[in-house]
Image: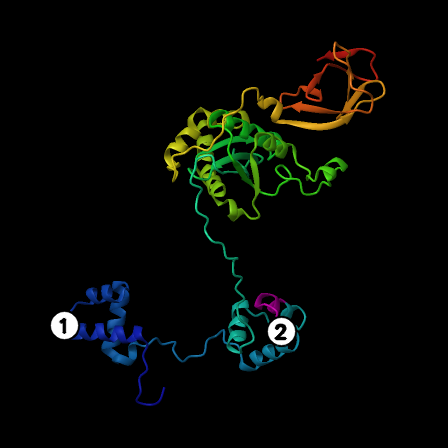
Amino acid sequence: MSEGTLLMSKKDSRKVQVLSRVKDRLITVRRASELLGISYRQAKRLWKRYRQGGESAVIHRGRGVVSNNHIEAEVKRRVLERYQAVYTGFGPTLAVEKLVEEDHFEPLSRETLRLWLVEAGLWQRHRRRKPYRKRREPRHHFGELLQMDGSPHPWFGQEHNSSCLMNLVDDATGITLALMSEEETTEAAMRLLWAWIERYGIPLALYCDLKNVYVSRDREPTVEQQLEGTQPKTAFGLACERLGIQIISAYSPQAKGRVERKHGVYQDRFVKELRLRGAKTIAEANLILHGGFIEKLNSKFARQPASEDDLHVRLHAGQDLRDIFCFEQRRSVGQDWVVRNDNRFYQLVRDHHPLPRPLTQVTVRSWLDGSVHILHRGRRLHYQEFDPKMKERRKVI
């Protein structure tokens, strides 16, 4: 600042304008404090300094004074030289750590180094752009596409273990159906889709992520599958195939954003509902879900689809969901007409139908209720389950 020249900031210039109006008795000191956004006591101190010293007294007294925390220019020069020589490309945080630990510089703040590097043109922030995603419009028909996902969360409070809320959301309407389970398992997914079908019908397609519950990624195809040109399917995938439901895989959480956002609604509202009801178990949570909570949620947040046509398909006569939502294995009949599955032994029983020959492949279906059913060419076979260590047969089907 040269002699006779007074450099002011916009803030200081504003103070001078307001205080000059006080001097001319156009406004009071209290009104000046309101205009400047400061307290009345501070305005009185400022007015006193203005009366005694004029416009120059308004300027902050620390302007032009070297800070007590000022770092010498020589230190700055040596830090930047060392950075260029050794730490080029290091972020400010890591560079500060190395300068102090390895080169024994005095402690330096990360922000100070960042400002020095930016000023010297040695650093610029590398912004990571998110991948471009075009917003997908909702499907037009109810039942055209469902989104399924599990939401692990401490539903009963932070002091309890996390449970998983299995959630189905219709893409066109936002209608939801949920089921609480310990984890995101095949059985939980089956039971939820089963409940949806009983309530609304069979949807056309299901949108879910790449978890092994829904799609098989690691299993190699069997010889039969290679000959047929098919890929391995999970038990859930087989159930959907029998029902004619197409499974579409989502490759990011954003792709199934509607069910992800619905998770947030449940994590907000359902957690509070569980706390109000004093629910602490999965069974109690399911009673609340299906005791009116889901209906209230749908009445509040569901929307009308673009088309009034419902694309759900009704179950065909003779279709048994117990025989669809099950775990199916292919097993060989032993020389003694014993079928082994999951380390359990089943002796086939002769009836008025001929038994399949030894080494013949049969289908073993384990229903969700725990019962086991053995089929050959679509016909159920009678059996006795037994323990090889025991002589007695325990059960006849």
Packing grade of label 2 (10 A; few <14, some 14-19, many >=20) is few
Total marks shown come to: 2
Tell me where the magenta segment starts and ends, as one range: 89-97
Residue at the image point whose x is 84% and y is 17% from the top: 389
| Looking at the image, residue 144 lies above or below residue 393 | below
Question: Magenta segment: does it hold 94?
Answer: yes
Position of the N terminus, as image quadrant, is bottom left
Q: Is residue 31 left or right of residue 226?
A: left
Q: How far apart are marks 2 and 1 (CA)?
A: 61 Å
| Looking at the image, residue 169 lies above or below residue 251 | above
Question: Magenta segment: does it hold 182?
Answer: no
Discs 2/1, front: 2
Residue at the image point whose x is 84% and y is 18% from the top: 336
Give, as a three-letter code, the residue at label 2: Thr
User: Residue 84 appears at what percent x and percent y?
Assistant: 62, 77
Q: Can residue 98 be seen in the rendering of this structure?
A: yes
In primary-sequence order, the first of circles 2 and 1 is 1
Query: In this figure, which residue is indicated by the disc labeled 1?
Result: 25
Tag 2's secondary structure?
loop
Mark number, residue 88: 2
Q: Can residue 157 be seen in the rendering of this structure?
A: no
Residue 239 found in image quarter? top right
Give, as a three-letter code, the residue at label 1: Arg
User: Residue 172 appears at what percent x and percent y?
Assistant: 43, 39
Residue 15 found in image quarter? bottom left
Residue at the image point whose x is 61% and y is 43% from the top: 210
User: Residue 361 appears at what percent x and percent y?
Assistant: 77, 26
The one nearer the camera, 245 or 340, is 245
